[in-house]
Image: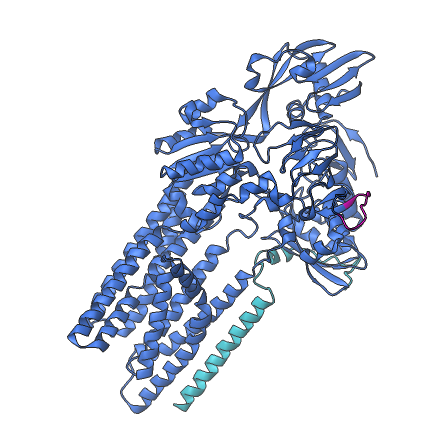
Amino acid sequence: MSALILLLSLSLLVAGAFLVAFIWSVKRGQFDDDYTPSIRILFEDKENSSSPQS
Amino acid sequence: MSQATLSTTEVKCYHCGADCDDSIIVHDDKPFCCEGCKLVYELLQENELCSYYDFTQNPGVSPDKTYYAGKYAYLDMPEVQQRIIEFTDGRQTHVNWYLPQMHCSSCVYLLENLHRLHEGVISSLVNFPEKKVRVVIDTQKIKLSKLAELLTYIGYEPYISLQDVEGNAQQKNNRSRLYKIGIAGFAFGNVMMMSFPDYFGLGDTQSDHQLQTMFSLFSVVLALPVFFYSASEFFVSAWKSIRKQYLNIDAPIALAILVTFLRSLYEIGTQTGVGYLDSMTGIVFFMLLGRYFQDKTYSAISFDRDYKSYFPVAVTLLKKATSKDTEAPTTSNEQILVTNLQPGDQILIRNKELIPADVRLISERAMIDYSFVSGESVPVEKTRNEIIYAGGRQMGGAIELEVTKKVSQSYLTQLWNNDSLSQQQQSQKRDLVGQINRYFTWTVLGLGLAALAYWYLVGDLPRGINAITTILIVACPCALLLSDTFTNGNMLGMFGSNKFYLKNAQVIENLSEIDTVVFDKTGTLTLPDAAQIEFVGKPLSALQKSIVKTMSEQSSHPLSRLIAKSLAASPKEKTLTHFKEVEGQGLQAQLGDNFIIKMGSARFMGIAPASEDQETSHVYFSFGGQILGYFNIFSLYRDNLSETLQALKQRHYQTYLLSGDKPTDVGFLGHLFGSEKQLYFLQKPDDKLRFIEDLQQKGRKVLMVGDGLNDAGALLKSNVGIAVSDNINNFTPACDGILEGSQLSFLPYYVKLAKAGRRIVIQSFIISVVYNIIGLSFALTGTLSPVIAAILMPASSISIVLFTTLSSRLATRLLLKKAD
């Protein structure tokens, strides 16, 4: 019985962590654009000549 | 660095891929069609960005030739900046600009490497589906106007319109829906897990009861955010529709959610059952998911443009109105927001700029292209002191104008504020599902209430409440709504892959109901940039052809352009001198000392126009004072027009033609449309609107197919307004759908497909009703075990989703493959 309660809370906790991760990723804008990253990955990183300033 | 000018044909520009007609600039062993393209290449080469050319062939965009220094000066005005800057902390500034020219992976590469082109750019991030780039700049090193100039220079002119500046804030609707889906999905999965022990049946021992209570409590806690947050949009929309006294799609689903939730709370509270929280969270999850995919279709295409998206943000002000100014009048050129224009202000309009307000011409002469407003393709000549209405486009040199009316009161703007347009928005939302729904909801409610009344009279009220809630839960039209959203979502995708982009699912419904099709002519039935040209008279020699070509290339008049294009194969004649253009009339040049060559209208030649001048546009050609004949210019119609109209007529659609143009090709078009009575010419924008309105009052459902701003009112007024465009990234007026020009001949099949979609919804509705009846009868006789029910519930939903997906794909394949 108490083992069940413990397991249940734990499973909810794990699932909740994933929910939080999902919400965080939406908030960070990771779902705003699901196409461009697939193009971006093809680019060569030839940053040897001039690197971006920040 | 080698530079040379060659003369060959069929060479494609290394940068933009355009045909290099006559003059090729060879640089670094690569051909370029113009200086602009070459300069971009040089810039990229200097900054080691030439992998730009590796991802796609000829990826570039030829830089805009109408650009002039100071075009973006208005971006440095504080009141403009306030609107277009997303974030700034004084040093770093973020802007998110729409770049309509973005079209391939190379574009992404170049735009994300902007920081290599200018040290003031800190970073840039492209959103390709929306064709937007978010640029972070260091305002100390680069001004916004300079950034816009840089983008324009490399061929990606940012599109900044009055709408952006007047600013309705962009809604972040998509994200909040994602949150809702996430929470609903999370709750659905976990409530499902909690319900499993109950499906398989718990014992009657003390600990089993405790377990059940605990599971139920967890379920309630999980269902609360779903009910109050995820499902909130159903409640809000249902409430809005009830207040307007009609039932929309969301009303029954809101009711079902509410009843399921309350009944579950009651059962759990009184320990009489475990409720239906798993069904409730599941339905909310699936509905939200379906809507997410349905709404996600075309983020790059905007369907709601009104005149504000066409108008420039700022114009060059010459002199402030002296009558009521408080500050000192300035004579130097400065930029002013068009919304701040006052009557009496004097403005400067350059070549190809749009005139934003009703104005009076101060300059000697102007050539105004009204194709935007009236559809008339030939520019109109205006002389000093004439009134020019907003929406005209100046062709040729810069002109000075005096504003007579404020932007918001101009003739064009009034069209948008037409009452009949705002009225109809509300009455339109009665689609098929809505109709079924109204009867369905009322029937179900009636049944439930009857059952309640019966048990109340018998004296067993609790049983009555039980009956009504059971009926409401079982009869929830969720399967119908599910099938509707998924069918429509699929159809939108299918249409989209066939280059027919619809605004939303409602349009499919409306499209299936139309019985009248109205076409615009210019740009819709005709090809915008092509014409059939023949020379009537003595055949021209090779020398004369090259003379004609060389002369017409000097002019920006559309007819000259068309003639020049038709003679692309001829070489240039370089011995011509003394070019002269009388705007709107003709061209003159000299060959040798005093051999005069003229091209132009009959008036320019000093002869009476031929009688059939109404029919086509004629350009006369005189060679040394002797008129050799004239160029006969027909507009070129799109392919397969007669088949398209034939197909529409066969299905008993009424077809009409509304053209803003003067009557042309009456015979040909009359044959196409059945009789000349179906053709209407010289229709002003509000005439078109009224025509549609008349048809609708006769009970017809009208599909309007148009292209320009001159059709905008009609497109809005019609039941379905489709804008035809040869480049979907171009600006089209507000409409329900955008159709790529080459696909116009498929129009009858699209309508047929929309009808098929409607049938699929009805079929899946019948299937879901059958499911419900079977389920209900099992439930009533008590022979359905909870496990089977738990399996059947999602299985029925999934089978319906599968059915709609497969059948809509099949319908598309059958209909559109046949069309090929």
Along the line of sight, which residue is nearer the eye, B407 or B237? B407
Say whether residue B275 is left or right of residue B287: left
Give how far across and how far down residue B373 sits, in percent.
58, 35
Image hue for chain B: blue
Along the line of sight, which residue is nearer the eye, B84 or B121?
A: B84
Chain A, colour shown? cyan
Residue B436 vs B38, above or below: the answer is: below
Image quarter of residue B123: bottom right
Q: Of all residues shown, which one is farthest toward the left?
A: B458
Q: Which residues are the magenta region?
A: B325-334
Q: Where is residue B549 drawn, in percent x and y?
A: 70, 21
Residue name at image x 62 percent, y 27 percent: B378
Image coords of residue B171 (percent x, y): 56, 59
Quadrant holding the C terminus of chain B: top left
Q: How is the structure coloured here?
A: by chain
Vertical placement of residue B684 versus B343, above or below = above
Residue at left 61%, top 56%? A36
Which quadrant, please, contains the N terminus of chain B? Answer: top right
Tell me, yes or no, whether the highlighted magenta stretch contains residue B43: no
Kindly give the residue lying farthest to the front in the view shown: B323
Q: Main secondary structure of the magenta part?
A: loop
Kindly identify the residue that appears in the image at 31 percent across and 51 percent down: B762
Q: Image height check: is B300 above or below B676?
A: below
Tell me residue B815's x, y (percent): 39, 40
The residue lying at 19 percent from left, 77 percent from top is: B460
Q: Quadrant of residue B210?
A: bottom left
